[in-house]
Amino acid sequence: MTFASKKLLGLMLVAVTLGASLGACVPLVVGGAAVVGTMVVIDRRTSGVQLDDQNIELSATDSVNKKFGDRVHVNITSFNFRVLLTGEVPTLQDKQLVEQMISGQKQVKSVVNELAVMGNSNLSQRSNDSWLTGRVKAALLDAKDLNVNAFKVVTERGITYLMGLVTQREADRGTEITRSVSGVQKVVRVFEIISEEELRALKPPQTPASAPASAPAKQ
């Protein structure tokens, strides 16, 4: 593992620890990007969309927990108003009901239902999934021709899901890298493909460097 990979994994562990102990009200700076809760400033979504996605996740998770409790294990990931459902439910009827509940949430445009009909995964499996997600992010970070912040990575039972606003080249390259990570059993692409022109339009204009301040005149 490269130094950059180790650094990213270390930072993610710090972020998780701080998030658990301090809540979402304290900003964390990672590599020059301010992290507030689960939102990162360096993102191709606007800050408003990031906030809306976070609210979708919180509201939908609360609804599922109230309806099903511990009978199901459902992870809800929203990116640009597109919701990915991963985890486990005991019956096909439950799978369909969860999707209907999430589809009815305000602002949700579409739902990708990847829930498995089976018993809930255990703590060891979930810890391994978190570790795999970290390894995939580290591998994407090591790729100098990709912007790791363009990708959202979710892993469930060794299956890694890739989300994001990416070009076709980025999608193919990110998929190739993820498949090469040891332990990843399968890669599922849930991308929103944009053109190179659309990508250029998303990039903020470069701010010219300001001229150095002149030294104060001697009295």
Image (cartoon, grey):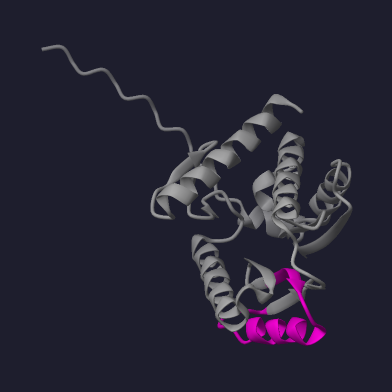
Residue at 78% in and 64% down = 190
Left or right of 195? Residue 18 is: left
Of 89 and 178, which appears nearest the observer? 89
61 shown above or below 138: below
User: x and y percent of residue 214 in the render?
Assistant: 29, 21
214 drawn magenta: no
Of 208 and 174, which appears nearest the observer? 174
The number of callouts visible is 0
Q: Residue furthest left?
A: 219
Residue at 74% in and 34% down = 142
Figure quadrant of residue 57: bottom right
Position of the C terminus by quadrant: top left
Residue at 84% in and 43% down = 177
145 shown above or below 93: above
213 shown above or below 106: above
Q: Residue furthest top?
A: 218
106 drawn magenta: yes
Of 199 and 125, which appears nearest the observer? 125
What range of the chain is rendered magenta? 83-109
Please say whether residue 35 is visible from this viewpoint: no
User: x and y percent of residue 122 in the render?
Assistant: 73, 58
Position of the N terminus by quadrant: top right
108 shown above or below 73: below
User: x and y percent of residue 206 in the render?
Assistant: 54, 43
Left or right of 197? Residue 55 is: left
Of 98 and 152, which appears nearest the observer? 98
User: x and y percent of residue 155 in the render?
Assistant: 75, 56
Residue at 84% in and 42% down = 181
Left or right of 48? Residue 2 is: right
Please say whether residue 215 is visible from this viewpoint: yes
